[in-house]
Amino acid sequence: MIKLIATTAFALALAAPTSAQEGLVTTPSKYSVAETIDRLESAVKSAREVQIFARIDYQAMAATQGGKIRPSQLLIFGRGGQLPQLLPNKPIVAIDLPPRALAWEDENGKVWVTYITGDFLKNRYGIQGKDDVMKRLTGFTRSLVEKALE
């Protein structure tokens, strides 16, 4: 499972900050990668009934294998509210849930936060008739990221 999460997060980390990749939001952070994720973790913990499922430090993981990469950390969090509405008809959407945010450092030392939106899920899985769920998912993730970046 960690390998699959790592692959997904690595793909998100490759998103260029000026790219127009539909469904991905990339926002600059004035904090380091670790502090950005610390702040996001704090925002998640302060939200009602939201759980942190995993925090993955890719730089530390690479170091254990003798590799060296720029700082990048992924936080996976949520409360499961979208699952009953999405999974019965599209169980494969679970591969991109629960919500997550990736803080990563580019080649110039600038830190960014990237997360997927409900539109990403809608387009990727052909989800129809769930626009309200998609908007709530995006708003939920965006609000936590914005709080972390204050």
Image: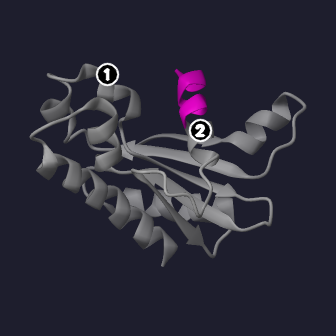
Nearest to the observer: residue 55 or residue 121: 121
- Along the polypeptide, which appears first: circle 2 or circle 1? 2
Three-letter amino acid code at the position of disc 1: Ile
Three-letter amino acid code at the position of disc 2: Ala
Query: Quick check: 19 left or right of 88?
Result: right
Q: Is residue 141 above or below residue 81?
A: below
Residues at marks 2 and 1, CA–CA distance in whole angstroms: 18 Å
Task: Report which residue position mark 1 lands on.
Answer: 92
Residues rendered magenta in the picture:
1-8
At mark 2, the secondary structure is: helix
Task: Report which residue position mark 2 lands on.
Answer: 11
Q: Quadrant of residue 12?
A: top right
Main secondary structure found in the magenta portion = helix
What residue is rendered at 59% in x and 38% in y?
Answer: 11
Q: Residue furthest right?
A: 66
Residue 143 is covered by the magenta coloring: no
Count residues near mark 1 (Cα–Cα under 10 Å), then give few for <14, some for 14-19, many for 20+: few
Q: Quadrant of residue 44?
A: bottom left
Q: Quadrant of residue 90?
A: top left
